[in-house]
Image: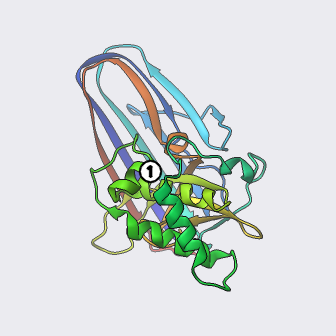
Amino acid sequence: MQLSVTHHTRYHYGQAAWLVVQALRMWPAPSESQQVKSWRVEVDGKVLQPTGVDGFGNPVATHAIDRQVSELHLAVHAQVRTLDRSGVHGDDAGGLPPMFFLKPTPLTLPSPGIIALADAAAGEGEGEGEGLGRLHRLANAVRDKVDYVSDTTDACTSAAEAFEAGTGVCQDHAQVLIAAARHLGYPARYVSGYLCPMEADDAAASHAWAELFVDGLGWVGFDPANRVSPDEHYVRVACGRDYRDAAPVRGLHRGGGDETLDVDVRITQSAQTTQ
């Protein structure tokens, strides 16, 4: 599937800020599930190139504005050919070993409720072994427990908090699944990217899901928010232990008062399909 991605993020400051520093993870690493035809990131209309790769394999760059600024505009323009690999990302070339992703983080500490849900899902389906069936049950159990309700959580919400509230968005579904999978002994990591509309009435969006390491397959994606494994509708960008590691933008500003932002994501599909 040929996809065109346009992503605009506009930051507005109540008063002029005199320093803005941002770390960006807005470029995709190479992947067998997608072929990047072109990918351009702009800061106030100027092209920004990645300056390095972090420990998770994500291309990264940091920029700073040390003058008064009341608005800041980030943009992504991309052309990507995606493939349906049934969620299988496979093995990373180099990088961190899967076992690194077994350790909880503050955002993915498993609460007693998450542990109980994981144990219950793992105990179902006797005779199905420890393969993909168990992990799909786990992802569906997370979605059953955490209803999709926007504006009920934020970037600082932990898996345990979202689980207790019973509401959240794709970020929360991913982190609850990660916490549950790690409890069961599966290395798990957070993935950020984009989701092309699957139906005419659906909106394009930035998106998040989880990848779990399965012996014999490598990293396999699970999107509990939509109860599927990522297919050709998904564009994979960055990964990490949790949201903080894979967030497209993390930063700080001095002065400026309250910071608000407007986000517009548009993804269109061309007539050309995969061969």
Residue 204: x and y in percent read: 35, 61
The residue located at (76%, 67%) in the rendering is: 215
Above or below, 85 relative to 44: below
- Of all residues, the one furthest to the left in this rendering is 14
The residue located at (60%, 46%) in the rendering is: 104
- Of all residues, the one furthest to the bottom in this rendering is 127
Residue 28: x and y in percent read: 58, 49
Residue 58: x and y in percent read: 62, 43
Above or below, 2 relative to 249: below
Residue 165 in sight: yes
Q: Which residue is mark 1?
A: 160
Which of these two is toward me, 146 or 24? Answer: 146
Residue 273: x and y in percent read: 52, 75
Scheme by which the image is coloured: rainbow
The amino acid at mark 1 is Ala
Above or below, 27 relative to 36: above
Residue 84 in sight: no
Which of these two is toward me, 182 or 33? Answer: 182
Judge from the rendering whether residue 127 lies leftward or rightward of residue 232; answer left or right: right
Disc 1, SS: helix
The residue located at (77%, 52%) in the rendering is: 93
Quadrant position of the C terminus in the picture: bottom right
